[in-house]
């Protein structure tokens, strides 16, 4: 386990990068943002699976299960929203 002094700068850098990515996407094109959050959701699920497998406490296992369920719901919702946006594409209806 790495000390928190090494993990804190990594967390802060990832927060800054995430902030820049989210706010630089134009509001007229939500599809890249939806794809990015779906990709991040899949990484969160893998991380939660690994973290839950390595814990021994019951509370940590339940929190890991909750994070897996919530990230899965987020991932499913992102794909559902992307499908609806693609289905309502105005260029597709002109054909």
Image (tube, helix red, strand yellow):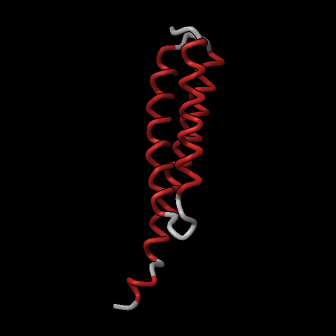
State how many labels appear: 0
Tell me which residue sits at (54%, 70%) in the image: 28
The reply, left or right, for residue 17 in relation to residue 92 is: right
Q: Nearer the viewer, residue 64 or 41?
A: 41
Residue 56 x %, y %: 55, 10
- Dividing the image into 4 quarters, which one contains the C terminus? bottom left
Query: Would you place residue 86 above or below residue 34 in this image?
Result: below
Residue at the farthest left position: 95
Tell me which residue sits at (59%, 53%) in the image: 23
Residue 92 x %, y %: 38, 83
Tell me which residue sits at (60%, 12%) in the image: 5
The reply, left or right, for residue 60 in relation to residue 76 is: right
Query: Would you place residue 86 above or below residue 19 in this image?
Result: below
Query: Would you place residue 23 above or below residue 72 in this image?
Result: below
Image-quadrant location for residue 67: top right
Q: Nearer the viewer, residue 69 or 17?
A: 17
Query: Would you place residue 40 above or below residue 76 in this image?
Result: above
């Amino acid at each position: 386990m790495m000390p928190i002094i090494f993990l804190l700068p990594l967390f802060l850098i990832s927060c800054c990068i995430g902030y820049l990515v989210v706010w630089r996407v134009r509001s007229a094109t939500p599809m890249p943002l939806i794809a990015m959050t779906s990709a991040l959701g899949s990484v969160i699920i893998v991380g939660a699976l690994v973290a839950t497998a390595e814990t021994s406490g019951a509370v940590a296992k339940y929190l890991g299960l909750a994070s897996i369920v919530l990230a899965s719901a987020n991932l499913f919702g992102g794909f559902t929203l992307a499908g609806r946006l693609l289905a309502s594409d105005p260029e597709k209806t002109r054909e």
